Image (tube, rainbow, N blue to C red):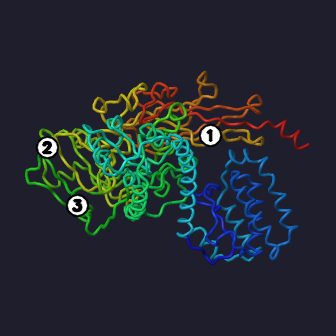
Amino acid sequence: MKKCNNSGIIKKLIFSSSNKTILNSKRIGLFRNGVGNNNINTTSFATFQLINKFIIEKRNFNSSLLLYTNNIINQQSNNNNHYSNKAFDQTKKENNNYHQQQQYFKNNKREIPWSTIKSLSLSLISLLGLTVSLSIYLINSSNFNEFIIEAEEQSINKKEEEEINQTLKEDEKKEENLPIYSLEEISKHNSLNNQVWVIFKGYVYNVTDFIASHPGGVEKIMLAAGKSIEPFWNIYQQHHTKEVYEILSEYKIGKLNQEEKEFLEKKHNKDKDNTNGLYANEPQRSPILNVNMAKPFNAETPPALLVDSFVTPNELFFVRNHLPVPKIDKDTYILTIEGEGLKDGPIQLTLDELKNISEYPKETLQVTLQCAGNRRTEYDSYKQTRGLGWTNAAIGNAEWSGIKLINLLKHYNISVDNLEQVIKHVHFEGMDTDGISTYAISIPADRALNDKADVLIAYEMNGKEIPIDHGYPVRAIVPGAIGARNVKWLSKIIFSKEECQSVWQQRDYKTFNPSTDWENVDFCKARAVHDSPIQSSICSPSHEGTIRKDEDIITIKGYAHSGGGKSIERVDITMDNGNTWLEAELQSERKEALYNRNYSWSLFKLDIPITDDMRGKDLTLCSKAMDSSYNVQPEGVKGIWNMRGILNNSWHCIKLNIENKEEEEEENT
């Protein structure tokens, strides 16, 4: 990483959401001046001290910021050429409260109005002689955003690496007396009849018994039969987890001879450079997002920001990428419509042609998209699943604009009635690929071709061109369906008698009973998931947060949504494990409910007065929603758990600590 010539320590203190500014320590990072090179001047350091003091007084950051500050202070204390030891000792003393306040700050994130931040910034600039241009550069710099994202990804990867390294160390104990094989011997085991062996980090694994259980399908894992799986795992980096390594360890049978092991290592290092080329088209992302995986990129919105506005801003919308972002050229982009039932053959149209179909003006639909894996981490707390660790914010609501699929077909004089007699499925194929597979799914034809199902071929998101991470230039929007059915970077619409045969249709996004695991699963028995179930979640306050002694009301905010176009009828909140319930206020901005054509979420709010008997205790709050078909969320995950970890719609619960006024006052005395 290159270093900037700026001599000051810079921190990302703010990011904007609507008319408010949130302080969030997860996004803090030093600007590229290289801490440790002793080039931090007195003015910059004084600024840093004041900002840290402000943070402590306002209680807006969690403990990691204070620890971070201490590290800088400790480092600079050794530089006697610039600062007096006395000044540093005083600052260190003030910051040593970190250990006592650690848990409090971790749980007590607060919002500060933009005006307050602006006022503070201007005061600091005036007092310390910092330039306005530097402040603007701080907030808007793309380099800074890249740094924040990179720092966060490194943090995530470091934690994963620690877990993986520990697993590998434990696995090394199995090395003794392992037979040694050559590449030639291993290459012969490349079929189910001859057993399937693979190589990983110099070890040999017989994965024959695992083939049928592979989430990516038999076809993909067989590509590595008799060879190393590392080139494939460099692309599908979701394999690099402690759980996957532990599963692989069960199949270890030997190791590669040392000479060929070194040969493979050199080859894989070259292959990594080529693999990174697949991710050459990744766009710049907001540092606000909570990253779950760097490659392919997957991130969710901070929950507290999710309920700030009914329509989720583009830059805050969660990102679910199955594969690398494709290279897009709008000038050469072509959307192809092909398949059975088209008498005049395939149709191809450009982006401009799609946007300028005059007889069917642009239509706008407000549609909530939710990843099927939303709230998977709550499943994992009960029993481990396989998939990305989504919390409760892999969801967003946006206004999508484009042309309905049915109107697009009418424009080309395609008879929907005739088409429905010939086909049963409509496939959507994206442009994203790993060089082996291309993302594709299908939906039933009677849904795709139904005018009241409102399937949209969209080219705008919230009144702007769809951002690259969300499918630019064209995305299929299937209102009411799980996110996976809303194909990004749409390149083909295919009419077929058969369901799509991709791994995402046949061996993913299916659910099974809680007793089914990867050893006995039969994917052919289950239908692909289309609509999401009734759902609600509390987004503010945050789980394990603290309600301060000077607060008299707990304000609960969250979202509720149901798939298939069903509207939300009610959201209830309980404080006593379901014995009694309070009804939340729905804050919906949509028009009057239509029958099964209500595609956006409802936000809810509830103010709960704090009584004396609540203080000094932990309080558990749970939300439960009901939709227009009177579907209600189940109480727990035990009965709905599934090995893939999708469709968790159990009650969403958070735990809060209510500070005791009397105890606080006695401590202060």
Q: Earlier in the sequence, mark 2 or mark 3?
A: 3
Q: How many numbered discs?
A: 3
Give the distance between the C-alpha atoms of the residues marked 2 and 3, in whole angstroms: 24 Å
Q: Residue at x 11, y 50 (%)?
A: 342
Q: Position of residue 542 (x, y in %)?
A: 62, 42
Q: Quadrant of residue 454?
A: top left
Of marks 1 and 2, which one's residue comes earlier in the chain? 2
Please indicate, yes or no, whether residue 587 appears anywhere in the rendered image: no
On the image, which quarter does residue 426 sit in? top left
Residue 332 visible to the viewer: yes
Question: In this rendering, is residue 326 above or below 636?
Answer: below
Q: Amino acid at mark 1?
A: His
Question: Residue shown at 64%/35% (left/top)?
Answer: 655
User: Residue 610 vs residue 480: left or right?
Assistant: right
Q: Which residue is mark 3?
A: 358
- The answer for how far apart the CA atoms under marks 3 and 1 are is 50 Å
Q: Which residue is mark 2?
A: 419
- CA–CA distance between discs 1 and 2? 51 Å
* Foreground residue among 641 and 469: 641
In the rendered view, tell whether residue 272 sits above or below residue 242.
below
Classify 10 Å Cα crowding around label 1: few (below 14), some (14-19), many (20 and above). Answer: some
- Give the residue number, with chain letter if any, for mark 1: 543
Q: Is residue 121 left or right of residue 484?
A: right
Local secondary structure at mark 2: helix
Label 2 sits on what residue type?
A: Leu
